[in-house]
């Protein structure tokens, strides 16, 4: 069934601060990045950027001259050729309404190096046509970019900065999503000290926190409407409390409620024992930086030291850790998981 207007997935309040921030940077041709834990709702924010009507409502005007080509870096094959092809495909998909564009040589390259350069030329030419001739703006969304930062190489990443230097400076920008800080991921080749691409957004990195209570309620209402309202308002409120604004946990708990109903006693113990919940908490922990992961486990066991303070402070900035004394995480299910976790 179709959800009514009251439960639209992307209402004007949805991730409003983050979405407005993204729009303001894109319109200025500036880049930014978000660092968020696994399952925190990053994909839903990325999907919002695919929704032209939602973007128009948020901006209060028509935004058809602004494009968000989205690159899913989990599909990256570890080469520059793969990255340029993914960026071209994303750009073509997001600007298909602009019509045909002659994208250069159709000669089939014989070597990997020749193919890489041919694709690079095509990407440059398409961007110059869009940004300089048509006077549109492009913000490339580099989604789940952890693996690319970790592997590099630096020379490949620097070419992304070069695209802006070719007359596109105020029209081309990047939005980068990672689970860990980019400069930490790229420490092996000194991303922080040597990368002009990293310099584009190093001062514009933001924590992607769990949903606000309003956004979490909105998401859960949408899920319930689409499913035909199988879960009562009382049980939805308990799901909200247990998930702590974590998007994937919200979905998991909601699905368990549909299948099994809400337990009558000790809901925390009941849900914490579910394999899907344990796997999601494990995924959150596994995708933290090693220092954060170890500090989190020591805090849960009452064994943390002053050396853990920087990592714990970062977890608080990310909205994952709510309180230090006594320790409280975004969700009581995460609390329970960390306390009982055995490495």
Image (cartoon, rainbow, N blue to C red):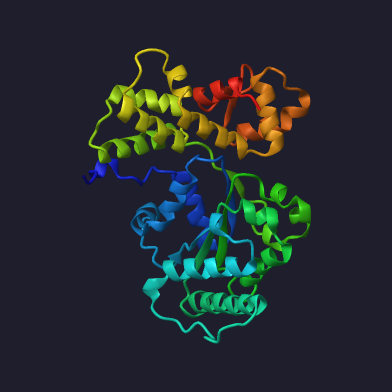
Residue 124 location (% of width, % of height) = 58, 76
Residue at 54 percent of width and 21 percent of height:
336
- In which image quadrant can residue 61 be found? bottom left
Is 97 on the left-hand or right-hand side of 311? left
Q: Is residue 122 above or below residue 185?
A: below
x, y percentage for residue 191?
74, 55
Identify the image quadrant of the C terminus: top right
Task: Return the x and y of residue 229 as percentages of the image width and height.
Answer: 24, 33
Instruction: Answer left or right for 4 relative to 198.
Output: left
Q: Quadrant of the N terminus?
A: top left
Badge count? 0
| Horizontal arrangement in the rendering, residue 189 relative to residue 225 (left or right) | right
Q: Name above or below for residue 343 compared with residue 67.
A: above
| The one of 60 and 325 positioned closer to us in this rendering | 325
Measured as percent of width and height from the top left, residue 316 is found at 61, 31
Res 111 → quadrant: bottom right
- Res. 53 image quadrant: bottom left
Q: Residue at x 55, y 54 (%)?
A: 74
- Closer to the camera, 147 or 35? 147
Please name the residue shown 77% across and 24% down the image.
Answer: 306
Q: Measured along the vertical axis of the image, is residue 291 above or below residue 32?
A: above
């Amino acid at each position: 069934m179709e959800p009514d207007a009251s439960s639209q997935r992307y209402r004007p309040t949805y991730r409003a601060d983050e979405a407005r921030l993204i729009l303001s940077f894109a319109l200025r041709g500036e880049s930014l990045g978000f660092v968020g834990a696994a399952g925190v709702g990053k994909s839903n924010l990325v999907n919002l950027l695919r929704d032209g009507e939602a973007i128009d409502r948020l901006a209060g005007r028509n935004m058809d001259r602004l494009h968000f080509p989205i690159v899913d870096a989990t599909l990256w094959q570890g080469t520059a050729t793969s990255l340029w092809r993914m960026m071209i495909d994303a750009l073509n998909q997001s600007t298909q309404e602009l019509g045909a564009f002659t994208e250069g040589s159709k000669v089939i390259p014989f070597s990997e190096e020749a193919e890489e350069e041919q694709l690079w030329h095509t990407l440059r030419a398409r961007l110059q046509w869009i940004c300089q001739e048509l006077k549109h703006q492009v913000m490339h969304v580099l989604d789940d970019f952890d693996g690319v930062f970790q592997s590099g190489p630096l020379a490949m990443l620097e070419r992304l900065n070069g695209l802006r230097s070719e007359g596109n400076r105020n029209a081309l920008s990047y939005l980068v999503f990672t689970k860990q800080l980019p400069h930490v991921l790229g420490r092996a080749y000194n991303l922080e000290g040597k990368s002009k691409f990293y310099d584009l957004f190093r001062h514009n990195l933001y924590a992607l926190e769990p949903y606000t209570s309003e956004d979490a309620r909105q998401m859960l209402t949408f899920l319930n409407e689409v499913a035909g309202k199988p879960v009562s308002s009382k049980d939805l409120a308990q799901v909200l409390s247990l998930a702590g604004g974590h998007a994937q946990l919200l979905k998991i708990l909601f699905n368990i409620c549909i299948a099994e109903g809400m337990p009558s006693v000790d809901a925390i113990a009941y849900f914490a024992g579910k394999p899907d919940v344990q796997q999601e908490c494990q995924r959150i922990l596994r995708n933290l930086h090693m220092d954060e992961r170890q500090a989190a486990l020591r805090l849960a066991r009452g064994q943390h030291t002053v050396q853990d303070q920087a990592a714990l402070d970062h977890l608080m900035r990310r909205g994952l850790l709510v309180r230090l004394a006594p320790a409280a995480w975004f969700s009581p299910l995460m609390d329970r998981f960390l306390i009982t976790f055995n490495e």
